Amino acid sequence: MKKVIFTAFLSYFLIVTSQVQARTFYTTEHVRIIENLNGDKSNLFKNSKKWVANNFNSAQDVIQYESPEEGQLIIRGIASPLCDSTVSKMQCNGYSQAKISFNLTIDLKDKRARLKFSNYGYARFGNTPIDDPITYKLMLNRFDSLSNDFEKTLSTSNNNDSW
């Protein structure tokens, strides 16, 4: 009888613990390669710094590393997730309150750029990893929006003579 009770007791814990699901943390890098930009590496580098100055509060604070020779900028930024039509307005209000910190590495070559978003997490909670699939999806929307704006800015010609 003791063996039956012990077996039942042990099997109860095996059944209960097998139902615990592991949380998924979203930690992969988001990379976008942009082709056919206007200009050489040095011109693209200057325009990239202007883009950073226009899209972040303080370019001096967010630029962590810059090398014109390598054609590389590393930026530490904070942004809110960007809502889309798959999220209701009430949910959007909640999700857009989150602040996501991230690293953005911009690698430049002649007529090409690579934007690599990495090391992202909740800024208000010590860069805690993203574990919510909706927040992750909306965060990728923000990264795509930044990438599209970067491409649009660097693809336009630099004729500012007609002001």
Image (cartoon, helix red, strand yellow):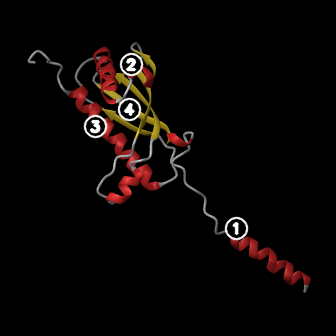
Is 72 drawn above or below residue 133 in the view shown?
A: above
**Distance from label 4 to label 3 (Cα)?**
11 Å
Q: Residue at x 49, y 43 (%)?
A: 28
From the image, tell me which residue sits under label 1.
Answer: 17
Mark 4 / mark 3, whichever is N-terminal: 4
Is 25 drawn above or below residue 155 in the view shown?
A: below
Q: Secondary structure at mark 2?
A: loop
**Amino acid at the residue labelled 4:** Leu
Q: Residue at x 41, y 52 (%)?
A: 95
From the image, tell me which residue sits under label 3.
Answer: 148
Is 152 drawn above or below residue 66 in the view shown?
A: below
Q: Nearer the viewer, residue 101 or 148?
A: 101
Q: Nearer the viewer, residue 42 or 79?
A: 79
From the image, tell me which residue sits under label 4.
Answer: 115
Q: Is residue 87 visible?
A: no
Image x and y of residue 141, in percent: 35, 46
Q: Secondary structure at mark 3?
A: helix
**Distance from label 1 to label 2 (Cα)?**
51 Å
Q: Residue furthest left?
A: 162
From the image, tell me which residue sits under label 2.
Answer: 71
Q: Residue furthest bottom?
A: 1
**Distance from label 1 to label 3 (Cα)?**
46 Å
- Labelled pair 2, 3 in contact (Cβ < 8 Å): no
**Amino acid at the residue labelled 1:** Thr
Q: Is residue 107 visible?
A: yes
**Amino acid at the residue labelled 3:** Asn
Mark 4 / mark 1, whichever is N-terminal: 1
Q: Secondary structure at mark 4?
A: strand
